[in-house]
Image (spheres, rainbow, N blue to C red):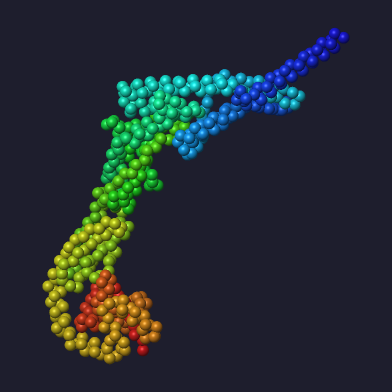
Amino acid sequence: MKVHFLIIFIIIFSVCLLNASSEDYLKIKNSSDYYIGECVSSIKECVNDEQMQKTALSKMILQMQSTVKVDISDDQTERDGKIQGELRQTIAMSSQIKLTNFKYISYSDKNNKYMLAYMNKTAYKTWLDAESERIKSRMQEAIEKEDILGLGDIIPIYLNLYAQTLLIPQAIMYENKADLNLYLYDILYEYLKESRKRSNVQKPNPQTPDIYPVSFDVRYMQMPVNNVKLAFDSDKIYKVVVGGNAELYIDGHSSVQKKTEKVVMTYDTQLAELADNIKGILDEHPIIYTFNEDLDFSKLVKVDFEIIQDGAEVCLTPIASNISVNEIQWQFGDDSYPITETKPKYKYNKNGKYTVTLTINRAVSVSKVIVVNDNALIEKQEIIAQEKQPIVEKEKEIVLNLVDGLSDLLEFTEVDNAIQWLVNMKKDGRIIYGKRSNFQKTDQCYVLIFSPVSKEVLNIIGPGQDDCRMDLLKKVKIDDFENEIKGKGVIWIQFLD
């Protein structure tokens, strides 16, 4: 009888204890005085108390962060605008909060186990205030050291303090500054901005002539700046060396003139002696200073050419260093077309003074003046004019009588008017015209030659083999037909019966 009574007493006592624990649990959970985090697990899952405590604590921290996030967002929006506010929200949500004075309470029923982590909001505010005071004290010590050592040596300390202010999810009032975090940011940003930079373009690597190294000497108060990373805001970066002396390799393939590149200067957290959690925050929210730098690659590029002259004929050889030659163009100073051969030979038809120009990659040009004074050319032209004049007149007269319409073509002095006449004649089925490759029997074609520059009709050459064609305008025999048309505008014409 006594045994049964004892069992009944124990059961009643346990139920009373359970109800009392449940009441305390719900009282804390429903109170507005605490930050809370709850974990509920089924009895069947057999989750131990330590696992449930960790889950409950993480939920409590998330609740604290989300609450603090709203407060900081409102504060930042009023002071610095929406964008700054959103940034601080992100920082608050990712901060790492070291907590003390939090507690757990738990109870169980037939089906579930309940675990509650809770912390008094007043105690949490006390913790925040204590952390703020600690950081302000360290800030004062850093300022005193700066007066003795200078700003450059204190930058790592300021970086550390800046990261710590990010970990505290509230604005810290410091002297007359509303937010110590923003104050530190301004110090670090101005330090980067005032850092003196000197850049120069060095000679290219002879084995990779298109790659130009650009060195930067970054200094502050005559001292090298450390913990700084320098990079061009460009897709053409080959290597970056960080530190007080930075060297970057820029593709100078077409950079033969002065150009402006955007340069980014930022702290390299891998070089600074900072805690891992602080490095992580600075990597995610770096302090960056950008500036535009003029890079003059033209000083490195050398373009010249060699001339070997034999009377009216010249042989040209280009000389180019520190630039890859992708496109080359020669102009001879007469009415001829430009030539794109690398080492051309060219023969002038007339004596005179000519300016030869070499252009590489449509960017770099160099010019030289040559004088053609070939006595043999003068004598040859005089002999041809004297000896062949009657024959030319006779052949011209015969040709004019045999070909209907040629007399009209001989009257044109501008190539544009001549082309319009050719178009109309082709529509009437009286001629065909085009390039040399369009004709099988070129010996039956007339050749209209014009200046590509002035658009002036220079001559019209009659049919025949290349060694016995006649210039119908100048009334002379053409001794070198290929040289006559070289570098000029040419239209091949065949009259139809």
Q: Nearer the viewer, residue 343 or 496?
A: 496
Q: Position of residue 45 (x, y in %)?
A: 71, 28
Q: Position of residue 123 (x, y in %)?
A: 56, 20
55, above or below 262, in the image? above
* Location of residue 372 by image quarter: bottom left
Q: Position of residue 396 (x, y in %)?
A: 24, 87
Quadrant containing the N terminus in the rendered view: top right
Q: Point out the residue furthest to the right here.
A: 1
* Location of residue 283 by image quarter: top left
Q: At 31% across and 79% down in the image, what residue appears?
A: 418
335, above or below 63, in the image? below
Q: At 35% across and 77% down in the image, what residue appears?
A: 434
Q: Is residue 90 left or right of residue 219?
A: right
Q: Is residue 46 left or right of residue 365?
A: right
Q: Position of residue 304 (x, y in %)?
A: 22, 56
Q: Nearer the viewer, residue 200 or 390?
A: 200
Quadrant containing the C terminus in the rendered view: bottom left
Q: Is residue 146 left or right of residue 468?
A: right
Q: Nearer the viewer, residue 236 or 63?
A: 63
Q: At 37% across and 31% down in the image, what residue appears?
A: 187
Question: Would you say residue 168 is visible in this rendering?
Answer: yes
